[in-house]
Image (cartoon, rainbow, N blue to C red):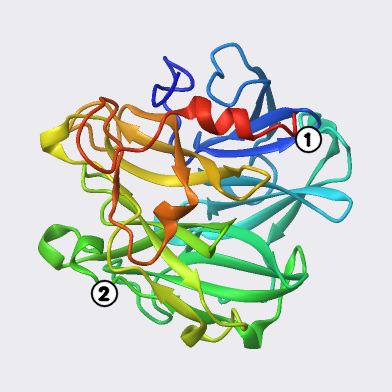
């Protein structure tokens, strides 16, 4: 089974999946809370165990919780997400952090609200992710250009972390701007780079990110390869000219694949890509379901053509079927 909703009746924008404790953990945008779901099967969360691990009441932050990500760092679990300041709406989004030292992240009693990520500018930011390069911890996020409140452009930022909750302020750097036409919705009047996620495969290491308008069927995944040794140097990053994954209206749905997370096979030759998309062309922000397809390492090469998320067979560059990837991933 492949490229079908992992939960048939639940919208799952911004799905984040990770392996741990013999299961797959899944979290996604639910607005007023953070839930973690668990399942033995990455393509089937229809009967998942579910746990509400945090609500914003009493934290000084309002509902408007977007894109939670679950990470295990050192000896603790962390959730990075964005939230709104009370009464200030989406323009007030900042990166927030939760921490749990409990081995089971499904246990709500273990979670502690750590507040905003420290050391980053007090400026609009969403979709924070963390990753290690050469045993050093980094955070990347999507944000408006510093000093710009027009909501016309979202860039990708990076900073080195002194700890999971503290960035080094003098390392904050812009590593990607939406400079390709396919990254720019509204006739090119806006530019969107968001949803960065670190992926390391054979022949590729870098960030997969989302581009164009998440409210359109032209939402897609792009590639930003780390080709140098210093992630804080913008010159160490190279953007691929072609998207990684997109939809094609002539091929049918689903449409607008974006905000992906990845489970990489032990040999680094393939990965499971979980992303959200819509069933119909004009669904906008409605009906965003999480799906899985297989992508191969060669799909991430800088000269590869884009993959299409169409669920039917036939034609070039369709994402492969999930079973092949599952057979390679034996860690559960």
Q: Are marks 2 and 1 in contact (CB under 8 Å)?
A: no
Q: Looking at the image, is mark 2 or mark 1 nearer the viewer? A: 2
223 shown above or below 113: below
Residue beneath the point at 65% across and 60% down: 130
100 shown above or below 196: above
Q: Residues within 10 Å of mark 1 (few under 14, many from 20)?
A: many
Q: Secondary structure at mark 1?
A: loop
Say which quarter of the image contains residue 184.
bottom left
Q: CA distance from mark 2 to mark 1?
A: 39 Å
Q: Residue 179's mark?
A: 2
Horizontal side of residue 155 vs 127, given as left or right: left
Quadrant occupied by the N terminus: top left
Horizontal side of residue 94 vs 21, given as left or right: left
Horizontal side of residue 153 vs 251, given as left or right: right
Residue 85 coordinates in the image, percent (x, y)? 53, 55
Residue 263 coordinates in the image, percent (x, y)? 60, 41
Residue 209 coordinates in the image, percent (x, y)? 43, 58
Residue beneath the point at 62% across and 21% down: 41
Say which quarter of the image contains residue 316.
top left
Quadrant occupied by the C terminus: top right
Which is more toward the observer, 277 or 321? 321
Say which quarter of the image contains residue 320.
top left
Which is more toward the observer, 54 or 21? 21
Return the disc, 2 or 1, that comes first in the chain's sequence. 1
Q: Secondary structure at mark 2?
A: loop
| Residue 168 visible in the displayed image | yes
Residue at which label 1 appears? 105
Which is more toward the observer, 37 or 114? 37
| Residue 122 visible in the displayed image | no
Q: Residues within 10 Å of mark 2 (few under 14, many from 20)?
A: some
Residue beneath the point at 42% across and 15% down: 8
Residue 151 coordinates in the image, percent (x, y)? 30, 66
């Amino acid at each position: 089974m492949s490229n079908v909703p992992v939960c048939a009746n639940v919208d799952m924008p911004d799905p984040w999946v990770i392996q741990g404790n013999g299961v797959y953990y899944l979290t996604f945008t639910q607005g007023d809370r953070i839930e973690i779901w668990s399942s033995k099967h990455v393509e089937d969360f229809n009967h998942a165990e579910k746990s509400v691990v945090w609500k914003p009441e009493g934290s000084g932050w309002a509902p408007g919780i977007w894109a939670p990500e679950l990470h295990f760092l050192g000896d603790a679990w962390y959730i990075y997400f964005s939230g709104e300041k009370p009464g200030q709406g989406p323009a007030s989004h900042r990166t927030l952090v939760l921490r749990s030292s409990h081995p089971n992240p499904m246990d709500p009693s273990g979670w502690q609200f750590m507040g905003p990520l420290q050391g980053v500018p007090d400026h609009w930011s969403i979709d924070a992710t963390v990753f290690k390069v050469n045993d050093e911890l980094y955070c990347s996020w999507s944000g408006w250009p510093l000093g710009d409140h027009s909501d016309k452009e979202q860039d990708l930022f990076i900073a080195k972390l002194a700890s999971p909750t503290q960035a080094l302020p003098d390392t904050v750097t812009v590593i990607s701007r939406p400079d390709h036409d396919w990254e720019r919705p509204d006739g090119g009047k806006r530019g969107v780079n968001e949803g960065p996620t670190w992926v390391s495969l054979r022949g590729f290491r870098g960030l997969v990110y989302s581009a164009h308008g998440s409210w359109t069927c032209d939402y897609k995944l792009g590639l930003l390869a780390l080709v140098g040794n210093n992630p804080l140097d913008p010159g160490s990053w190279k953007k691929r000219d072609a998207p990684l994954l997109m939809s094609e209206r002539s091929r049918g749905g689903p449409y607008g694949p974006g905000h992906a997370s990845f489970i990489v096979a032990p040999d680094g030759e393939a990965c499971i890509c979980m992303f959200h998309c819509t069933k119909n062309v004009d669904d906008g922000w409605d009906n965003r379901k999480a799906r899985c397809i297989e992508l191969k390492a060669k799909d991430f090469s800088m000269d590869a053509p884009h993959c299409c998320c169409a669920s039917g067979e036939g034609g070039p560059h369709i994402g492969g079927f999930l079973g092949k990837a599952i057979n390679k991933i034996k860690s559960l």
